[in-house]
Image (spheres, grey):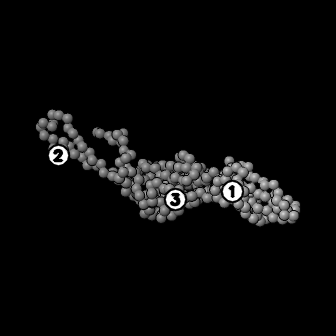
Amino acid sequence: DGITSNGTIDVTLAADVASWQYSLDGGVSWLDGAGSSFVVPTGSYSTNLIRVKQIDRAGLSSNVSRYTLALTVDAALEAPILSPTDGSSMSKTGTLMLTFAETISAVGGKNIVIKSAADDTVIETIAATAAVINNNTVSIDPSDDSLVVGSNYYIEVDDGAFVDVAGNDSAAIAGNATWNVTINALSASLLVSGDNYVNATENNSNTIISISLSSTAAILTDLVAADFTVT
């Protein structure tokens, strides 16, 4: 696929070579080679952009050899964006998300671990392969029963839980100082007939019941009619 984490290119040298050079910009500029290989820096290179030429003992240059494939050198997988962000809050049924800068896949045997901020107790362990991955986004859905409203948690992710196309592993998210979340509470207030009193006239007509909900946007925006039951 032309994507690699190792930018080393080996050069086969002629028997009478005195020196050799390589170019990363299609021959606009040349760099002196050493040994029998060179390292292409991180970046993307179109076809024929990488070139090599050899100079023999008589000072004559060989024909220029060209790397005829497109090449991308990707030497590291950047840390993801965390959602919710560290120190913020989420609903009890919310989703934890990791957004990487490039397409990734999960690695078997690696886990995401949710721990209590109060005493470091392991609340839930979720296999990396159980997460939902959409190109560069990882969605993690904790069990509703494992999280307690009003409690604080931190999330750890194993080193190498995810890998990019070039084979670079994701770094670990470890300890209680990187990804902390609080589970929000939802409070409600009830108002009947505007004043909590039902007079004789109101008793013989439809009674209006008003409910005011208070919480953070993370919870309120997720609420739908099916979340409510009137008994």
Which label sits on residue 106?
none
Give the side of residue 156 with respect to residue 6, left or right: left
Amino acid at pointer 2: Asp
Residue 27 image-quadrant placement: bottom right
* Mark 3 or mark 1, whichever is nearer to me: 1
Residue 126 in picture, x, y percent from top left: 53, 52
Amino acid at pointer 3: Glu
Residue 180 in picture, x, y percent from top left: 45, 60
Residue 1 in picture, x, y percent from top left: 68, 47
Residues at marks 2 and 1 touching, judged by CB atoms closer than 8 Å = no
Q: CA distance from mark 2 to mark 1?
A: 78 Å
Which label sits on residue 195?
2
Residue placed furthest toward the top: 204
Residues at marks 2 and 3 touching, judged by CB atoms closer than 8 Å = no
Residue 226 image-quadrant placement: top left
Does residue 75 sit above or below 219 in this rendering?
A: below
- Residue picked out by circle 1: 25
The residue tagged with tag 1: helix, strand or loop? loop
Does the rendering let one see residue 130? no
10 Å crowding of disc 2: few (<14), some (14-19), many (20+): few
Q: Residue at x 84, y 64 (%)?
A: 59
Mark 3 vs 1, N-terminal side = 1
10 Å crowding of disc 3: few (<14), some (14-19), many (20+): many
Judge by depth and name the residue closer to the eye, 90 or 228.
Answer: 90
Mark 2 vs 3, N-terminal side = 3
Residue 88 image-quadrant placement: bottom left
- Residue picked out by circle 3: 156
The residue tagged with tag 2: helix, strand or loop? loop
Residue placed furthest toward the left: 200
Does the rendering let one see residue 62? yes
Mark 2 vs 1, N-terminal side = 1
